[in-house]
Image (cartoon, grey):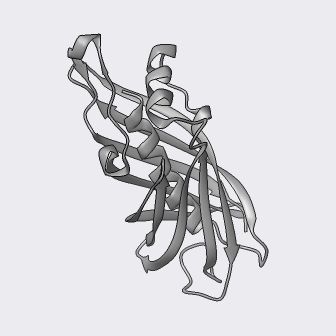
Amino acid sequence: MGLRPVRIVTAGIVGLALLHGGAAAAQESTIDFTVSGSSTIRGWTCTVTGTAQVTAGSSTPVRGLAGGVQTATLTVPVKDFECPNDEMTGHLLEAMRPDEFPEITFRLEGYEASGQGAVTTGTLTILDSTKEVSFPLTLTPSGSGVRIEGEVALDMTAYGVEPPVVMFGLMRVRPRIRIQFSGIITP
């Protein structure tokens, strides 16, 4: 059950990092991620807080970021995932192997301004597998920063994460997960 939340969170973190531009130097902000999925018995949701490090640059302007984004990296600390109970958290951590792969990262490669935000493209690394991902982000000016919100669906097995199987095979986590993320970045 825990594997799905990790993949969703990773994708969410990646999206947030892409949109976090502002000052000429890289700025770091916190982003909240919710990873959810289902099993043969019930649905599940786990959460984690990650960071977005963004460097503003002379690139395509997007809502709330007039100067655009030069670089962005989202990082999720795998050991910090929290699930509704210790057993679920344990299954997730067993699948994600935080001692060997302590972080999930997303590195922005590009984006296109789109309506209320942008469509981002970059690389997502989970365990030792790196794949290209693309997802939309909503950007909303908020005080001196920009609220970033997004969602992405992933198949955890594409990144080498084995969905947990417990109770002698009676409960199996399905490989599709959904990652939702939100946070305010300050340029």
- Residue 89, position as x, y percentages in the image: 50, 23
Residue 173 position, x and y percent, is: 28, 28
Look at 61% across and 63% down and name the residue there.
73
Quadrant assignment for the C terminus:
bottom right
Which residue is at 27% across, 21% downward?
42
| Residue 171 placement: quadrant | top left
71 on left or right of 2: right
Where residue 152 sits: x, y (%)?
37, 53
Q: In the image, is 92 to the left or to the right of 19? A: left
Asked if 41 appears above or below 134 in the picture, the reply is above
Q: Residue furthest top?
A: 167
The answer to whether residue 65 of the structure is visible from this angle is no
Q: Quadrant of residue 164?
A: top left
Query: Which residue is pictured at 52% across the width and 43% down the height?
Result: 33
93 is higher (above) or lower (below) than 62: above
Instruction: Mark yes or no: residue 159 visible.
Output: yes
Depth check: 7 or 66 in front? Answer: 7
Rendering coords of residue 97 (x, y %): 52, 35
Residue closer to the observer: 151 or 153? 153
Number of on-image labels: 0
Q: Can you tell which quarter of the image residue 63 is in?
A: bottom right
Looking at the image, which residue is at 42% across and 45% down? Answer: 8
Which quadrant does the N terminus fall into? Answer: top left
